[in-house]
Image (cartoon, rainbow, N blue to C red):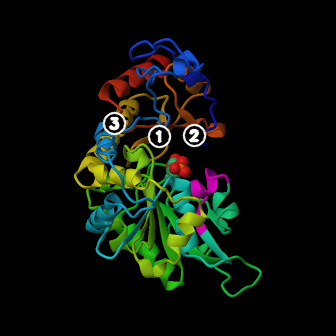
Amino acid sequence: MTEHAVTDKAITENATTEPVTEPATADTTGAPAAGRQGARLHDPSVRGFASDNYAGVHPEVLQALAAANDGHQVSYGEDVYTARLQEVMAGHFGPGVEVFPVFNGTGANVLSLQSVLPRWGAVVCARTAHINMDENGAPERVGGMKLLTVPAPDGKLTPELIDREAWGWGDEHRAQPLAVSITQTTELGTCYTPAEVRAIADHVHARGMKLHMDGARLANAAAHLELPLRAFTSDAGVDVLSFGGTKNGMMYGEAVVALHPEATSGLLYLRKMNMQLASKMRFISAQFLALLEGDLWLRSARHANAMASRLRAGVEGIDAVRPTQATESNGVFAVLPAGAADRLRESFRFYDWDEAAGEVRWMCGFDTTEADVDAFLAAIRRELG
Ligand SMILES: Cc1ncc(COP(=O)(O)O)c(C=O)c1O
């Protein structure tokens, strides 16, 4: 089910120790040869559909990192890039939002949820939510909250599904359901409309709960919906957002965005306490600026979504491939006949989603090319067509 379910054998086998820079001069350090002078250890021609985290860094983001690199800047977020990011995020999400750059998505989720919950709080989420399936219990162990999960066959919660676990307030025997977490786009590649988010937000708020959105792929949602980011976040009633940068082309970095800061508390302290306060924060902020000041975030997300649509259209004509979800972002989910996934994986890496059901997940990223998709489709047709 997770990205880690398959061994790294394919990658290791594809590794090469051939240096791509000038050959190293005589070694005086005792370092192994392949580790000297920035030698490339992998074969960049090896492509796959395993994860949007497999891509490198977008060249425009790398340029921004280099531009931010000279000279000194105050550490721990008191730098000019982080100040500018605050303004740029306000442009996307509305005046008054508060931005907290962090290292990764798990950290963003844990501290977002902590910021809207008391010590006795619980979070209603889909069983397939990343916070439930893929964070090694960090919300529970690190965040100290209970997750109350409900089955959501397409990854999307609804007010009715939320009500399966949103009950028992005032009962000291029950962890108090005081927040709901939804993922946009979902772990299954589906996308909430602004009206769906609004209906959840109204439902949640009417019960005194708060709404968190895991936006690891928020840009892909905007590209799919063809709407500004705020239309299905701040304007639709989301209180706190984990905003993804990594899958959108950054080297690393996400941000907690308090969309309605009065609904949150303690984010400044929680970030440090959760070990998510970067001393050289300018480099996270500069990467976000590279994405968000212009349209790089949208260009990249549109491209990734378009590659998934191309892949989906291609498999539609292959009877043995049975898509299981709507393709509304950058992933395609499908059931394959027994044994086919392993044979295809000999040339293209990708993960099982539900091994028992024979369901696989194919992800595209900003760097997926039409040629990648077409080569993969040709392999699928050879195997199953
Ligand atoms: C839905 C979702 N949320 C959050 C994350 C962020 O996780 P990480 O802690 O690996 O940055 C991911 C990454 O796979 C994700 O798919």
Is residue 327 in sight in this rendering?
no
Which span of residues is magenta-colored?
124-136
Give SS at disc 2. Answer: loop
Dot in front, 3 or 1: 1
Tell me the CA gap for discs 3 and 1: 15 Å
The reply to whether the residue tagged 2 has its Cβ within 8 angstroms of ligand 1 is: yes
Q: Amino acid at mark 2?
A: Glu
Q: Residue 143 appears in which quarter of the rendering? A: bottom right
Q: Amino acid at mark 1?
A: Asn
Give me the disc on residue 53. Answer: 1
**Residue topped by disc 3:** 307
Name the N-terminal-most of marks 3 and 1.
1
Dot in front, 1 or 2: 1
Tell me the CA gap for discs 1 and 2: 10 Å
Mark 1 Cα-neighbour bin, 10 Å: few <14, some 14–19, many ≥20:
some
Is residue 316 in sight in this rendering?
yes
Tag 1 near tag 2, CB within 8 Å = yes
